[in-house]
Amino acid sequence: MKRAEFHKLFKAPGPVLLPVIHVLDFDQAERNIRIAIGEGAAGVFLINHDFEMARLIPVIRQVRKAFPSLWLGVNFLAVPGDDAFPVLGELQSDGCPVDAYWADDARIDETGNDPSQATEIARTREISGWSGLYFGGTAFKKQRPVAPEQWRDAARQAAPFMDVVTTSGIATGKEADLTKIRDFRAGIGDQALALASGVTPENAESYCDVDAFLVATGINIEGDFYNIDDERLARLMKITRTIGGGTNR
């Protein structure tokens, strides 16, 4: 997906802020979604950090019923697209559409010699009938390490296989190396780029060339993995409205 198309979708000239909610149950998810909506977030991602994928499915159904117009993304922790897309296709067929899937590992081969895994994921996505956006983790935290000199190649190889190329710092809550972001931008050109770790109100301006911020730790209550701090979210929202402005938007 081109950057201009992505920003048009969200009606946002700067980075699109998408809070990530580490789900405990529906009540906790609903409470945090209402905070996110109240502060003007464009949507949210739900993630099953503490339990298996199957337990998140009924929460997704409840959330969609409670918020029928919410832009809703999902991350099934450590589940690649070829396992996730059939589930998302079934949800969509049942009247429970999910707008985006974020995979921690899009199975990209930065050398370009063996794209078979990413190709199989793409084939499964097509067969599933699911129509949402694919945020594909590339050179991502807690996955197979990619050497810094191969970041640009990894991004270039990833671009044809996903809507939004998605990367991170070295761990949850750790900000990404700015060189990595520059290399990714060079590798993907005018395709949409998301950053999924380490963004805070204090450093967001450094990442003005990123198109989406997927944020949990940076907006949560200090020391609380599960609940959004509305004041920190409001601060970051304000910053995203004043930064950005890549030439292709």
Image (cartoon, helix red, strand yellow):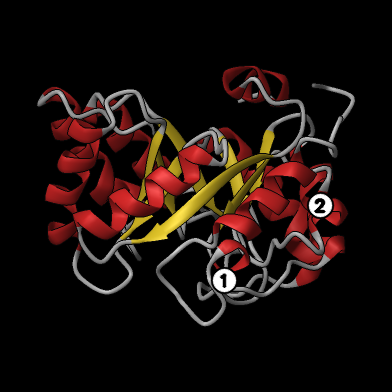
Q: Looking at the image, which residue is at 66% across and 70% down?
A: 146
Label 2 sits on a secondary structure element that is helix
Residue 12 at what x, y percent from top left?
A: 69, 26
Task: Residue at the far bottom: name it.
Answer: 223
Which residue position is annotated with label 2?
207
The answer to which of 71 and 172 lies nearer the viewer is 71
Q: Which mark is residue 141?
A: 1
The amino acid pointed to by label 1 is Lys
The answer to which of 210 and 78 lies nearer the viewer is 210
Q: Callout 2: few (<14), some (14-19), or many (20+) C-alpha neighbours within 10 Å? A: many
Q: Looking at the image, which residue is at 18% across and 32% down?
A: 65
The amino acid pointed to by label 2 is Tyr
Marked residue nearer the N-terminal end (1 or 2): 1
Residue 29 at what x, y percent from top left?
A: 30, 54
In the picture, measured across the screen, residue 69 lies left or right of residue 90, that is: right
Is 97 above or below relative to 76? above
Label 1 sits on a secondary structure element that is loop
The image quadrant where one finds the N terminus is: top right
